Image (cartoon, rainbow, N blue to C red):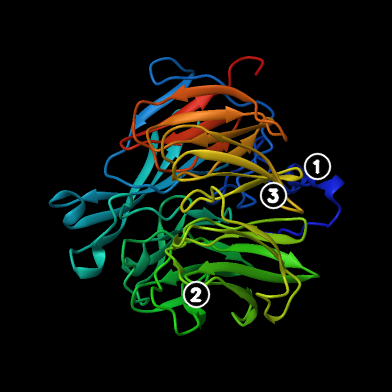
């Protein structure tokens, strides 16, 4: 997996994301969607056509029922779709769980294999939030293995044929409301956040063996240490950084060693969920609960504590607690948990527009076919035209609860709802 390196020329930004995504395509004829928020980790697709109008009773594609429950997003690699789920062995979410990985044919929805990776026995640190699941971390693939993470229950690698290659169940922490952080890949490492209520750290496992290569503890003195964000790999001046938000602080780490490069503090903000995005030499971080969430635009070329020197701009207006932001061209777009979408200038933070979409939101938006897609918790998707003026193109209903983010492959959207997985094909000519 390649690091994302963005130049400072704003005129180039419109074209950069598609070029990067094409570079990361694995030659399958369609851009692979290999991790949470796609191959760039930022919700960007190179698809030229995607569906604009659909409903659950009338669409081109397929629908399959998914046994168990999980709010992890699907990933797609070379025509195979991978996702995780927790199948109750006892009393629903409160009982024992079979933690599973499934592979489906992305063209037909047919199950190729379905493998149990761990059995989770009921105990104190298996309680989850009502909006969480026991399978919320999205898988990731490097084209050789599928890596899955179930928090303190364990992390594992599987072959593309479903063979279990290794497991690691040595990482002990209390995730408070359940696991949310998805793994990322950097070099020969699998990296993820372990921000528990009792102990908080970032760790890197060897991709080939699952052995822990480094562990970096979060700074002390934080009252509520639990958070659920997914890190982002970036490249700054030829050096690979891992940007990892946590409660009260966002840190950038050296990808190879785990040593801190820089940090920015935002005291009394905790339970951070959104994944950062990176554009124009700045990383954009949402700060989490307790106080109203803020969006920080942070220059990434600093060293040490850069709280006072490298925050280019910030806003506390309509910032999400759960959905990640998205950058398209020279604008950054967000949707707040209570359904207010907004668009700001990337470099200065100036507000272009805000619009109430309706509903509540947890899924992160995606961009493809020249459009931005926002999916609400009740399964309503609002499609807009990117730009400095709000332009709604469509509004679609799935009729079922949905907290997972979209996947994109082969000019189709893959949508996970409470009990189903859908492939929605593009309409002819759209």
Real-space Cα separation, disc 2 to disc 3, in angstroms: 26 Å
Badge 1, how many Cα within 10 Å: few under 14, some, many 20+?
few
First in sequence: mark 2 or mark 3? 3
Whether pointer 1 and pointer 3 mark residues with C-beta atoms closer than 8 Å, the reply is: no
- Residue at the image point whose x is 46% and y is 72% from the top: 210
Residue 189 in the figure: left or right of residue 402: right
Please tell me in which quadrant of the rendered image residue 110 appears. top left
Q: Nearer the viewer, residue 338 or 46?
A: 338
Q: Residue at x 53, y 36 (%)?
A: 374
Q: Where residue 293 sits in the image (x, y, percent)?
A: 51, 58
Q: Secondary structure at mark 1?
A: helix
Observer-side mark, 1 or 3, equals 1
Which disc, if any, is residue 15?
Answer: 1
SS at mark 2? strand
Residue drawn where x is 44% and y is 84% of the image: 221
Q: Position of residue 357 (x, y in %)?
A: 50, 32
The numbered dot on residue 24 is 3
N-terminal of the two: label 2 or label 1?
Answer: 1
| Circle nearer the N terminus (1, 3) | 1
Residue 109 visible, this angle: no
Rounded to the nearest angstrom, the CA distance separating label 2 from label 1 is: 33 Å
Q: Nearer the viewer, residue 137 or 26?
A: 137
Asked if the residue under mark 3 is in contact with the one under mark 2, i.e. CB atoms within 8 Å, the reply is: no
* Relative to 235, residue 372 above or below: above
Q: Secondary structure at mark 3?
A: loop
On the image, the x and y values in percent for residue 216 come to 52, 81
Question: At which x and y percent is residue 125?
Answer: 25, 68
Residue that label 2 marks: 202
Disc number lying in front (2 or 3): 2
Name the side, left or right, on which 307 lies relative to 146.
right
Where is 388 relative to 216, above or below?
above
**Closer to the camera in the image, 384 or 211:** 384
């Amino acid at each position: 997996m390649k690091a994302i390196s963005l130049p400072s020329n704003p005129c180039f930004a419109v074209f950069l994301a598609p070029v990067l995504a094409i570079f990361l395509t694995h030659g399958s004829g369609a851009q692979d969607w290999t991790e949470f928020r796609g191959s760039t980790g930022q919700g960007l697709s190179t698809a030229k056509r995607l569906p604009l109008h659909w409903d659950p009773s009338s669409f081109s594609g397929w629908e399959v029922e998914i046994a168990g429950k999980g709010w992890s997003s699907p990933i797609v690699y070379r025509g195979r779709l991978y996702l995780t789920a927790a199948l109750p062995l006892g009393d629903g979410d409160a009982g024992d769980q079979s933690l599973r990985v499934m592979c489906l044919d992305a063209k037909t929805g047919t199950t190729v294999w379905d493998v149990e990776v761990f059995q989770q026995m009921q105990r104190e640190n298996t309680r989850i939030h009502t909006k969480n699941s026991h399978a919320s971390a999205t898988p990731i693939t490097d084209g050789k293995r599928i890596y899955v993470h179930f928090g303190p229950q364990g992390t594992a690698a599987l072959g593309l044929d479903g063979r279990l290659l290794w497991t690691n169940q040595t990482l002990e922490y209390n995730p408070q409301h359940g696991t949310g952080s998805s793994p990322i890949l950097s070099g020969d490492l699998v990296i993820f956040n372990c921000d528990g209520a009792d102990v908080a750290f970032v760790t890197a496992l060897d991709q080939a063996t699952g052995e822990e290569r480094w562990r970096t503890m979060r700074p002390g003195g934080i009252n509520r240490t639990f958070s659920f964000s997914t890190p982002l790999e970036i490249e700054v001046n030829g050096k690979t950084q891992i940007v990892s938000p946590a409660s009260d602080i966002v840190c950038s780490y050296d990808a190879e060693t785990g040593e801190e490069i820089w940090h920015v503090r935002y005291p009394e903000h905790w339970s951070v969920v959104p994944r950062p995005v990176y554009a124009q030499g700045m990383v954009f971080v949402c700060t989490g609960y307790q106080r109203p969430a803020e969006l920080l635009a942070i220059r990434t070329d600093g060293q040490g504590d850069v709280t006072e020197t490298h925050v280019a701009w910030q806003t506390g207006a309509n910032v999400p607690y759960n959905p990640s932001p998205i950058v398209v061209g020279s604008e950054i777009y967000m949707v707040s948990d209570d359904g207010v979408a907004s668009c700001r200038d990337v470099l200065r933070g100036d507000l272009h527009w805000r619009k109430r979409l309706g509903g509540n939101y947890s899924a992160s938006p995606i961009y493809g076919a020249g459009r931005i897609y926002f999916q609400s918790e009740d399964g309503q998707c609002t499609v807009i035209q990117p730009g400095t003026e709000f332009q709604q193109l469509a509004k679609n209903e799935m009729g079922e609860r949905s907290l997972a983010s979209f996947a994109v492959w082969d000019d189709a959207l893959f949508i996970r709802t409470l009990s189903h997985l859908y492939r929605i094909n593009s309409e002819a000519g759209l």
